[in-house]
Amino acid sequence: MTEFEIIKQYFQSGISGQGVVLGIGDDCALLQSQPGMLQAVSMDTLVAGVHFPANADSELIGQRALRVNLSDLAACGAEARWFTLGLTLPEPDLPWLQGFSQGLMKAASEYNISLVGGDTTRGPLSITIQVHGEVAPGKALRRDQASGHDNIYVTGKLGDAAAAVAMFDRDISPSQDDSEYFLQRYYQPTPRLKEIHQLASWVSAAIDISDGLVADLGHICERSDIAAVLELEKLPLSDALKRSCAAMQSLQLATSGGDDYELCLLVEETASSQFEAAAAANHIGVTCIGHTRAGSGVECTFRGKPFPINTQGYRHF
Ligand code: ADP
Ligand code: MG
């Protein structure tokens, strides 16, 4: 199959979403932003053997590739609109492409985002997606707007995706049901787009947890010039995680394991009760796990005592 046949067969679905004046098939896509909105743009690359096991089911890879990018749009409070796909393949493996494009398009239709272009090349398997969202000026959530008197919240549960990675590395061997749950959390993270649109007005700063809670919260502290205190006994852990690991290991996975793509949200103390009420009214699971103060860095405590934890997030270099 040629490059052009691949594009036509698997990626040129012909559906044109909101604001797509011209999609796949020309030198450029032509996109119409809504008047007065800012574009939020983000890119993530997934390399086989680094970001997913090389032999993983291609439908799951397609799902995950788009979902992790959508999580960045959620973290800045943007609405998903358009994406482009840079696909590098060792060879045109048709069953692989069939599964991959199905997974990708399933996630695209679930989150209402249109594939508008890309590039297809030969080489070691890697997937780059660039997402474009829209956000009203003044509504974008940033890392540099936290204060020294915020409460720290996370959505969902932490550590489940890291438990899947620990399974790949044979560090843990959970029951069949728990294994399936961890794999689902790893391959199909939930970009918290709907959730953030309900909660954004109370949030002072946000980040999505891709590299590990402590590392990612550390980015907010650095950009906002504040310190954070995490109370580890408050971390939301799934029953599956509690069953599958020793207590210390589950805290380690929840604080320094990446790949959960939950949001870490900072909310001024005075706005916290309204924020929690909005979360409850919209059935959004959020947990308060600590607070900020003047200073720098992230301090971990357990029942009020300092708690040493190896917290360096994943680093490529
Ligand atoms: P050019 O040579 O002008 O860069 P290409 O031949 O690479 O264009 O691609 C032809 C069209 O197909 C373009 O519209 C491009 O955006 C699109 N395209 C290429 N690869 C992909 C892909 N993997 N997914 C979606 N669209 C793609
Ligand atoms: Mg090209």
Image (cartoon, rainbow, N blue to C red):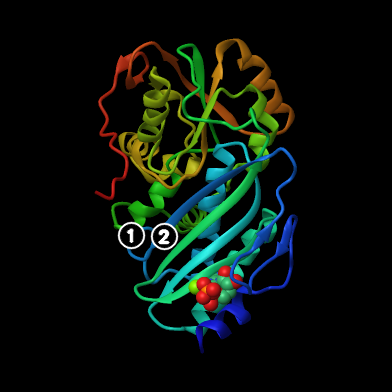
Q: Residue at x 45, y 12 (%)?
A: 148
For label 2, being within 8 Å of ligand 1 is answered no
Front in this rendered view, residue 23 or 143: 23
Residue sitting farthest toward the bottom: 1
How far, Cα to Cα, is label 1 from label 2?
7 Å
Q: Position of residue 192 (x, y in %)?
A: 60, 42
Q: Amino acid at mark 1?
A: Val
Q: Which residue is mark 1?
A: 50
Image quadrant of residue 275? top right
The mark total stands at: 2
Q: Is residue 43 left or right of residue 221?
A: right
According to the picture, the residue beneath numbered tag 2 turns out to be 46
Closer to the camera in the image, 260 or 176: 260
Amino acid type, residue under disc 2 in the picture: Leu
Depth check, front residue: 263 or 148:
148
In the figure, residue 88 lies in which quadrant? bottom left
Direction from residue 81 to residue 228 in the image, left or right: left
**Crowding near the residue tagged with mark 1, few <14, some 14–19, many ≥20 C-alpha atoms within 10 Å:** few
SS at circle 1: loop
Q: Is 31 drawn above or below residue 14 in the view shown?
A: above
Q: Quadrant of residue 24?
A: bottom right
Is the residue under label 2 in contact with that under label 1 (CB below 8 Å)? Answer: yes
Q: Is residue 248 above or below residue 106?
A: above
Up the image or down, 10 lies above or below 140; here it is: below
Which residue is outermost to the front? 27
State the image coordinates of residue 130 (x, y, percent, origin top left). 52, 56
Q: x and y percent of residue 30 in the render? A: 67, 61
User: Dot 2 surroundings within 10 Å: few (below 14), some, or many (20 or more)?
Assistant: some
Q: Can see residue 99?
A: no
Q: Nearer the viewer, residue 47 or 63?
A: 47
